[in-house]
């Protein structure tokens, strides 16, 4: 993969963004967002790609299904973050690219419902290893006006979360 000085990259198994300062044979000298220098093997560097995913669409609630409990009886907007559910006929994206698309979609969805003064939303993140769920929780942590808790539980784990929004104090993501 070809990199250039000044390009912003990610590093495998690391969080954050890094700016390339110089390139040697197999090493890239980078600076993180806090100004710390680091030497990274070239095979650990990943280009960052940005995708335009368009408007976020909410799923219609199936009114023919019987209501199971009080939470399900509400008309709660939901967002399915499984990558297969996106209208994306793009080339095969890397795991990092998929993750970036999922997080950007999540943030736009929350911001749209904050503007609509929606008090509760349902985020379907899947069971998996919990990376997407933990990143959503990290995104909301420390921000006033957001409470996140598990929505359902199966034998495989928790695959969805409710987010309560206190619209009077919540800030956009």
Image (cartoon, rainbow, N blue to C red):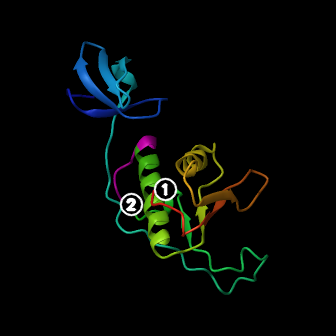
Pick out the residue farthest to the bottom.
Answer: 64
In front here: 125 or 145?
145
Residue 56: give x, y in percent of width and height. Answer: 43, 68
Element on which disc 2 rests: loop
Magenta-colored span: 88-96
Residue 133: give x, y in percent of width and height. Answer: 60, 49
Mark 2–mark 1 contact, CB under 8 Å?
yes
Tell me which secondary structure the magenta stretch mostly adopts: loop
Q: Is residue 171 above or below residue 70?
A: above
Which quadrant of the figure has residue 87?
Answer: bottom left
Q: Is residue 114 magenta?
A: no
Name the residue: 23% across, 19% down.
22
Residue 158: give x, y in percent of width and height. Answer: 71, 54
Name the residue: 31% across, 44% down.
49
Q: Which residue is mark 2?
A: 88
Q: Residues within 10 Å of mark 1 (few under 14, many from 20)?
A: some
Q: Is residue 89 magenta?
A: yes
Q: Residues within 10 Å of mark 2 (few under 14, many from 20)?
A: few
Q: Is residue 74 above or below residue 82?
A: below
Q: Which residue is mark 1?
A: 83
In front here: 117 or 157?
117
Task: Report how far apart the C-alphas of labels 2 and 1 lie in the structure.
Answer: 8 Å
Indicate left or right for 8 with 92 as reference.
left
Q: Is residue 22 above or below residue 83?
A: above
Element on which disc 1 rests: helix
In front here: 146 or 95?
146
Pick out the residue farthest to the top.
Answer: 25
């Amino acid at each position: 993969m070809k990199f250039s000085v000044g390009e912003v990259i990610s590093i495998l198994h690391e969080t954050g963004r890094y700016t390339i300062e110089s390139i040697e044979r197999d090493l890239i000298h980078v600076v993180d967002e806090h100004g710390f220098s680091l030497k990274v093997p070239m095979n650990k560097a990943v280009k960052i790609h940005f995708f335009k995913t368009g408007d976020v669409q909410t799923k219609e609630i199936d009114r023919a299904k019987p209501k199971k409990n009080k939470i399900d009886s509400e008309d709660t907007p939901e967002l399915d973050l499984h990558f297969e559910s996106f209208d994306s006929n793009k080339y095969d994206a890397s795991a990092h690219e998929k993750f970036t698309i999922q997080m950007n979609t999540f943030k736009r969805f929350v911001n749209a419902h904050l503007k609509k003064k929606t008090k509760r939303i349902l985020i379907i993140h899947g069971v998996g290893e919990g990376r997407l769920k933990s990143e959503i929780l990290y995104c909301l942590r420390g921000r006033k006006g957001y409470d996140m808790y598990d929505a359902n539980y199966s034998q495989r784990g928790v695959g969805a979360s409710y987010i309560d929004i206190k619209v009077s104090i919540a800030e956009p993501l």
